[in-house]
Amino acid sequence: MKEKVSVIIPNYNYEQYIIERIDSVLAQTVPISELIILDDASTDNSVLVIEEKIKQIKKEYPDIRVSFLKNSSNSGGLVFSQWQKGLKEATGDYIWIAEADDSSSPLFLETALKFFSENPKLQLFYSESKKMDGKGNFFADDCQDWCDIFHTGRWKEDYVNRGVDEIIHYLSSNNTILNVSSVVWKNGPYLYDIFESAKDYKVAGDWYIYVKVLEHGDIAFSHLPLNYFRKHGASASTLDIRDKEYKEVFQIQEMIRKQYELPDDVVEKQRMRRVFMGYVENEKNHGTKGRIAWFVPALLKGGGGHRTIFQNVNALIKDGYQCDVYIGDNHAHTPGELFKMIEEYYGEFYGDVFASWDNVLKDYDCLVATAWNSAPVVQRIPCDKKAYFIQDYEPFFFPMGATYVEAENTYKYGFHGFTIGKWLSHKMQEEFQLKTDYFHFCADLNVYKKLDNVSKEKAICLVFQPDKPRRCDTIALQALQIVKKLRPEVQIYLYGSQPCVINNLEVTQLGIISIEECNLLFNRCAVGMCMSASNPSRIPFEMMAAGLPVVELYRENNLYDFPNDGVLLADGNPEAIAAALLQILDDEKIQKEMSEVGQKYMRKYPLEKGFDEFVLHFNHFMEGKKERNQKIELSYKREKIVASKETMNVSLHLPTVTFGYKNVQNQSLIRRGLRKIKRMIFK
């Protein structure tokens, strides 16, 4: 006996498409036995149009059984209830749920039935789909960008597969069947119950159905685009829908993971599927105290500011907040790639990562800007609480002009400020009347510490980062040139950026090194430099924790956070900085005293103290508590170091120190040389 096909067309307000849909069904090269049209209380003229069309069908196709089921009131979007209603009416051996706004090739059913005839175990057939717009214009010949997100090439050819294998290797991570109109099902008693269970899902119910159907048999796919899927333009997903989608994707993945033993690569694909949605699922990031969105600039390898941000985000997560980090990356990387970069560059991270400052996906309890260019983004997003995590006086990064003023204006938005160090808090309050709380500069004392088995060298280490003008690298190199001229035996180590060509100064460039290698370097050297013309850097405090005396610039930004001993602050010219360096290099007693004072001072400021201070202030801010006024006074009260006659006289006769990357002829040779140098220093 010839097998029969029942076609179910659910309709709601598709008056302009319903005739095309019905005609595409009637035009199939294999005749259907039954047409069941459902209307979910349309408010347009769909019912009248359908009723007229049915009259025509009954005249021209008397062998087709036609049913028209009309709801008196709308089902409220319960699509699977409509499917059940059509299924209950259907008598065919095969079911085709043909959405009212889609269309198809006349060969669709013929191709499907051929696959069914060749495999009695087949439960589900689907075909490739063309995408068309609301006017019926095709704009994509396939849906590979949706189904083949891992770029396997699998959907370029026909295939037949065991249902369980399809679930484990493909449907376990992603819904690869993108449009129900592309599917023909074998009718069976289990379908009705599966549709019933799918009602628990608001977004991913069709995915659930495909999984459950394939537990009963095989699947077949035709790579020919026989289904025409109509996409009505970019629909704006609400935050609520995006959250529901994420939860349901995780729910279905977890259901499959519990039922089947999945290979490791498939489990990783499950995670990556969530990444493609913009989320990075992280079981550690499910706090109950509130949802916080952080807006962070593009990642920078070796960036201490980024490390501080992610460490403090982790501290909030541990305290019970859920933190999502939006990276100003403009989708140059996937969220998964960014997550790996964060962990590689800055250490373990517990938060969720997004690849752009656009399309904020949730309603948040607080938004946190972390840079002058992220602050305007935060200002535009509605939220009751907004904060500013301030690590530098960023206008100083730019020449006086438009960008300087724009950066300065961000402090006038009225966000609540959290500053690293006291000077920034003082400046924000005094100049911009910005309410702020500060936390101290601290160091990881498990990493930065005195090593008893390391011999001291007569050496200086400098954080050298030419891409950061605030580091005053030209002035620092000129100061080192003076020292080298006066004390040729002194070794000079530069680290913190990729090596470059430096003329008229003999130095050893170490490149970007690990924090453990930094501590070893601090223990080998007699004095350290990390100059900053904006806010102090955290690095001098790490140097002090390792017992390394520090030379820095005598500027207002350095007078509120450095202790009175442990560092020497010098006037901002090369001759004065050289004088400060020589004062330490030439006197072992001063070296020892500064080393001991620096270590003693930093014992009061382990890294955890800074986190605790920040979390305490953040909790008070979220709870609306008024903080007591934090008294901010100068901490460094010594006279600045000025140039000596010796350094002034020498500097008059020295050639100019220059540096740059343009003349590097053989980068691989330099990298090999660097590896040898590192092995020598860090052996």
Image: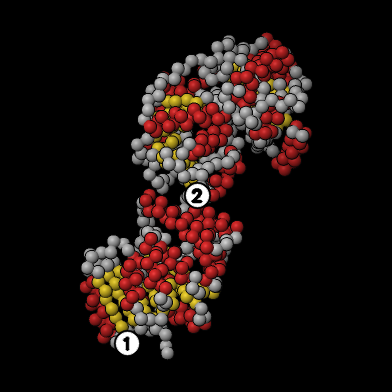
Residue 603 locus on image (x, y percent): 60, 23
Residue 550 locus on image (x, y percent): 64, 20
Amino acid carrying label 2: it is Glu
Residue 112 locus on image (x, y percent): 46, 78
Identify the residue position indicated by label 1 in the image.
Answer: 63
Q: Is residue 140 visible?
A: no
Residue 494 locus on image (x, y percent): 68, 29
Q: Residue at x 54, y 35 (%)?
A: 311
Residue 125 higher or lower than 302, as above or below: below
Amino acid carrying label 1: it is Asp
Q: Which mark is residue 281?
A: 2
Instruction: Name the quarter where the N terminus is drawn.
Output: bottom left
- Which of marks 2 and 1 precedes in the sequence? 1
CA–CA distance in space, label 1 to label 2: 54 Å
Which picture quadrant has residue 139? bottom left
Residue 236 higher or lower than 286, as above or below: below
Instruction: Name the quarter where the C terminus is drawn.
Output: top right
Colouring scheme applied when the structure was drawn: secondary structure
